[in-house]
Image (cartoon, helix red, strand yellow):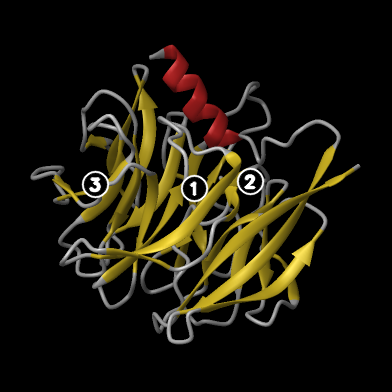
């Protein structure tokens, strides 16, 4: 269990696991479902990750070096979002369905060795309000009515799914299986929370009811499948697939592809070819408001 915990913490708290003597090149892409093609809108010789799409469709939000930055759908850099004293944001952030509130997972500089607490702030920015008193806690989803958030957290040495009011308060445990449960995200109709879980001995997509009951497996192959992001039409979800089994980790710098999961039939089809990515590619909800496109990040390495 200690080894599992260490692997998961590494994947969740480091901005990248980069080979010695190499530098990261990050490229932000938008995938169009109708054309089946990806368009690169921004490439930079630095590490950034985890795009969200603003609910008004005007910009993408990425994190880099603890800050949150806005990028237009055309790739124009629109500056940083004001997050007050919260300056160690990781790649677990996102908006309520109405776009009025942003949730941020961030460490605290006074805690050595890594930490992650969950905060909320107005979509316009400002000084965030801390919601979770315990660390590590990684935000992943919010209910359609904006009253409940769901997140992955380590308590007593195990990663499980928890829920809490978006005003803070009592932490409610939704899963209790051994091994990693991660990536909780509400369906747009509020009927399910989609997660990825190692409970079968392979990382697969599952869904549970909002109270944690009735777990149902959604993927069944021999890949490591993570982070189901449900489209606004509530019919399909993007998932990130590692080509080789990664056990309970989702590291940076692996061969992956993005796939589309039909939530009714459970059939899966490839969206992209294999590429270099992983941690940071598509951790959080990244669909456009109209559900026609989604954003993601590809990586490359160059010598220092």
Which residue is depicted at the point 61% across and 46% down?
Answer: 89
In this rendering, is residue 143 above or below 107?
below
Q: What residue is at 23 percent from the left and 34 percent from the top? A: 173
Q: Which residue is mark 3?
A: 220
Crowd around label 3: few <14 · some 14–19 · many ≥20 (10 Å): some
Q: Which mark is residue 292?
A: none
Which residue, given by chain and number where applicable, does mark 2 sit on?
A: 86
Q: Residue furthest left?
A: 214
SS of the residue at dot 3? loop
Q: Measure how far apart labels 3 and 1 are at the Cα level.
A: 34 Å
The location of residue 259, given as percent across then percent down, is 40, 62
Q: Earlier in the sequence, mark 2 or mark 3?
A: 2
Q: Is residue 3 left or right of residue 112?
A: left
Q: Quadrant of the C terminus?
A: top right
From the image, tell me which residue sits under label 1: 119
Please tell me how crowded label 2 is: few (under 14), some (14-19), or many (20+) other residues with Cα within 10 Å.
many
Observer-nearest of 89 and 262: 262
């Amino acid at each position: 269990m200690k080894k599992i915990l260490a692997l998961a913490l590494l994947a969740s708290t480091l901005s990248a696991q980069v080979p010695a003597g190499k530098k990261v090149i990050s490229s932000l892409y938008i995938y169009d479902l109708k054309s089946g093609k990806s368009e690169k809108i921004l490439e930079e010789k630095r590490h950034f990750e985890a795009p969200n799409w603003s609910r008004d469709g005007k910009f993408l939000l990425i994190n880099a070096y603890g800050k949150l930055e806005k990028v237009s759908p055309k790739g124009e850099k629109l500056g940083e979002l004001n997050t007050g004293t919260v300056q160690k944001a990781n790649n677990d952030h996102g908006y309520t369905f109405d776009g009025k509130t942003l949730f941020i997972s961030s460490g605290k500089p006074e805690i050595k060795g890594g930490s992650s607490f969950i905060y909320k702030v107005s979509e316009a920015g400002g000084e965030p309000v801390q919601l979770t008193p315990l660390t590590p806690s990684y935000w992943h989803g919010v209910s359609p009515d904006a009253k409940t958030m769901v997140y992955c957290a380590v308590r007593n040495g195990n990663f499980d799914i928890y829920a809490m009011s978006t005003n803070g308060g009592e932490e409610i445990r939704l899963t209790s299986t051994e091994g990693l449960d991660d990536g909780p995200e509400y369906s747009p109709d509020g009927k399910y929370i989609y997660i990825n879980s190692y409970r079968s001995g392979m990382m697969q997509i599952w869904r549970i009811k909002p109270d944690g009951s009735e777990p149902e497996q959604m993927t069944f192959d021999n890949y490591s499948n993570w982070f189901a992001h449900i489209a606004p039409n509530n019919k399909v979800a993007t998932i990130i697939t590692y080509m080789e089994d990664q056990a309970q980790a989702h590291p940076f710098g692996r061969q992956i592809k993005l796939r589309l999961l039909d939530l009714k039939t459970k059939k899966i089809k490839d969206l992209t070819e294999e590429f270099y990515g992983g941690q940071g590619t598509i951790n959080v909800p990244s669909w456009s408001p109209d559900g026609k496109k989604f954003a993601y990040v590809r990586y490359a390495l160059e010598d220092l």
